[in-house]
Image (cartoon, rainbow, N blue to C red):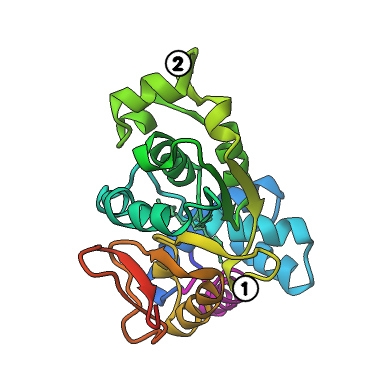
Amino acid sequence: MNLHPQDFRFFADLLKRESGLSLTADKTYLLESRLQPVVNRHALDGIAGLAHRLRGGGTALLLRDVVEAMATCETSFFRDMTPFDTLRDKVIPALAAARGREKYLRIWSAACASGQEPYSIAMLLKNHPLLQGWRFEIEASDISEDILNVARAGSYSQFEIQRGLPAALLVRHFTKDGERYVVKPDIKAHVRFLRRNLLAGTYGLGVFDFIFCRNVMIYFDAADKRRVLQSLQGALRRDGALFLGGAETVMGLSDHFRPMPGGAGAYILAEA
Ligand SMILES: C[S@@+](CC[C@H](N)C(=O)[O-])C[C@H]1O[C@@H](n2cnc3c(N)ncnc32)[C@H](O)[C@@H]1O
């Protein structure tokens, strides 16, 4: 495959605009290998043909397929563990004290991929000794409808389960379905999946006690990171917490957040 530089630029601009994905020229191979299945599915004449079709307007479905094909949906249960330790040991005790009257928490897992993140949060909250008898709701969003359908099914392979899920939680919260493991309805009931582009802001989502927005802004350029942090700030309750990925930070991007003391990867509002 030999992608014409003009076509590379076209896709790079389109993806930046549609999903925030910031592609540098060294990612030509990635672009080609991810878009080839889209070319095949729509029976187009190569990647140049795909670019041609999109330049001519294309269809919403074709555009969606391109955006989804380029999304990196890598995830795992209790990914990196540290944020979940911070959640269990610092954030939940503080929120349990502050929300003792309502006994209710609202959570956002932004860019939830195949669901391991929101389900990990749900299991952690369900088993937390300070939250017994509490209600909690997790909004789990992603730009990719395909990956959201995987998340909604909540059905995982042995390999996916082995990546981070403790045996005790597997026994308690999953049922076996042939070779796969399915999240039980009582955990699923806490999670609502919805398609949402982080670049579109948080209008209509309301406010949250804590937000996980992990391992997605790493693909954005600085301007889009600023924009997203700005909107996350507006969606977080004053004493809430924001969790970012291990390679992500607010430094140089937002003055509204500061690192949570002793909480690696977690941020609180600067004025809190
Ligand atoms: C690497 S996964 C991260 C999953 C999970 N948060 C974690 O840390 O394991 C990144 C996810 O971000 C989603 N994504 C990419 N761009 C997005 C955007 N503009 N808005 C919402 N989700 C996006 C992708 O579809 C993908 O599922």
On whether ligand 1 comes within 8 Å of the CB at mark 1, the answer is: no
Q: Which corner quadrant holds the C terminus?
A: bottom left
Nearer the observer: mark 1 or 2; the answer is 1
Residue depicted at 47% across the width and 61% down the height: 211
- Direction left: furthest residue: 262
Question: Majority secondary structure of the magenta segment?
Answer: helix
**Residue 152 in the figure: left or right of residue 167:** right
Q: Secondary structure at mark 2?
A: loop
Span colored in magenta: 5-22
Q: Residue at x 56, y 52 (%)?
A: 102
- Given the image, on which type of amino acid does mark 2 rest? Glu
Q: Which residue is mark 1?
A: 201
> Measured from the top left, where is residue 52 in percent x and y?
71, 70
Residue 45 x/y as whole percent = 67, 57
Classify 107 as above or below 201.
Answer: above
Residue at mark 1 to residue at mark 2: CA–CA distance: 39 Å
Residue 179 numbered mark, or none: 2
Return the disc, 1 or 2, that comes first in the chain's sequence.
Answer: 2
